Image (tube, helix red, strand yellow):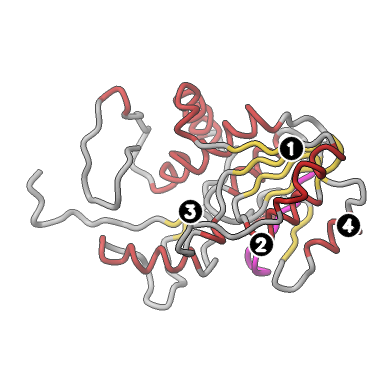
Amino acid sequence: VKAGSFAEYTVVPAKQAVPLPSVKPEFLTLMVSGATAYISLKELGELSEGKKVLVTAAAGGTGQFAVQLAKKAKCHVIGTCSSDEKGGFLKSIGCDRTINYKTENVESVLRKDYPEGVDVVYESVGGKMFDLALNSLATKGHLIVIGFIAGYQNPTGLQPIKAELLPAKLLKKSASIRGFFLNHYLSEYKMALKHLLKMYEKGDLVCEVDFGDMSPEGKFTGLESVFRAVDYMYMGKNIGKIVVELPHSVNSKL
């Protein structure tokens, strides 16, 4: 894993490379998305049996792991998604309550079904979803911010939130908001990846990959299809981690 944009090849120091058992697209899902869910929930989530965990964009690249890891910690997991198909996938990986925000009012569902709030939120959407998640926190609840995809296409990269009441809301519930950026937890990275790989190989972890077969122009192949893949993600169509297949380049200098 190295900073930089899309490329067929990259050079990294050997100590930064992580050995993989074989070349499988599923392993790509673990490198950033899986590791982010694993380390953030372990370090910041304070998960324990019976806690209620809300995962936003739950059927996405990293949401799928947050759902499964919270279930393995014996938590009650609620996942938001944008289609019934995604809801079906979430149920298949153990999600207790799915909320399709296109057909259900997330705020109403949470208020009705979880009147005392949720203990942990794994939040990657931002904007209105962040406000809603914050309002849904239980006393001593934790909101973990791992992204804010709703704003990535804005000029600023952000969607406005209702921050003026934030201090009062946190105080009222003794709640906390924590940001998580994987680069700051690299000391935990190899251990996390090793654990996730072991779980996958034992059949204890689903690593859902979306190759774009259902996209209008079909499977994402070659660097030229990266643009389509990014658009597909922003349209919220993917289930799991989007992977672009790069065939061996005939013009490769390597």
The mark nearer the N terminus, 1 or 4, is 4
Q: State the CA–CA distance, disc 1 to disc 4.
A: 17 Å
Q: Amino acid at mark 3?
A: Lys
Q: For this rendering, which residue is in front, 143 or 9?
A: 143
Tell me which segment is drawn in magenta: 76-89
Residue 161: percent from the left, percent from the top?
A: 66, 56
Q: Amino acid at mark 1?
A: His
Above or below: residue 222 compared with residue 54: below
**Which one is in front in this view, the residue at disc 4 or the one at disc 2?**
4
| CB within 8 Å, label 4 to label 2 | no
Q: Residue at x 35, y 29 (%)?
A: 18
Give the numbered dot on residue 142: 1
Above or below: residue 187 compared with residue 61: above
Residue 105: percent from the left, percent from the top?
A: 79, 68
| CB within 8 Å, label 1 to label 4 | no
Residue 218: percent from the left, percent from the top?
A: 38, 73
Q: Residue at x 92, y 51 (%)?
A: 115
Give the numbered dot on residue 241: 3
Residue on which the image places disc 2: 81
Q: Residue at x 42, y 78 (%)?
A: 216
Q: Amino acid at mark 2?
A: Cys
Which residue is situated farthest in the front direction here?
164
Horizontal side of residue 18 vs 151, given as left or right: left
The mark nearer the N terminus, 4 or 2, is 2
The mark nearer the N terminus, 1 or 2, is 2
Above or below: residue 67 compared with residue 187: below
Give the numbered dot on residue 111: 4
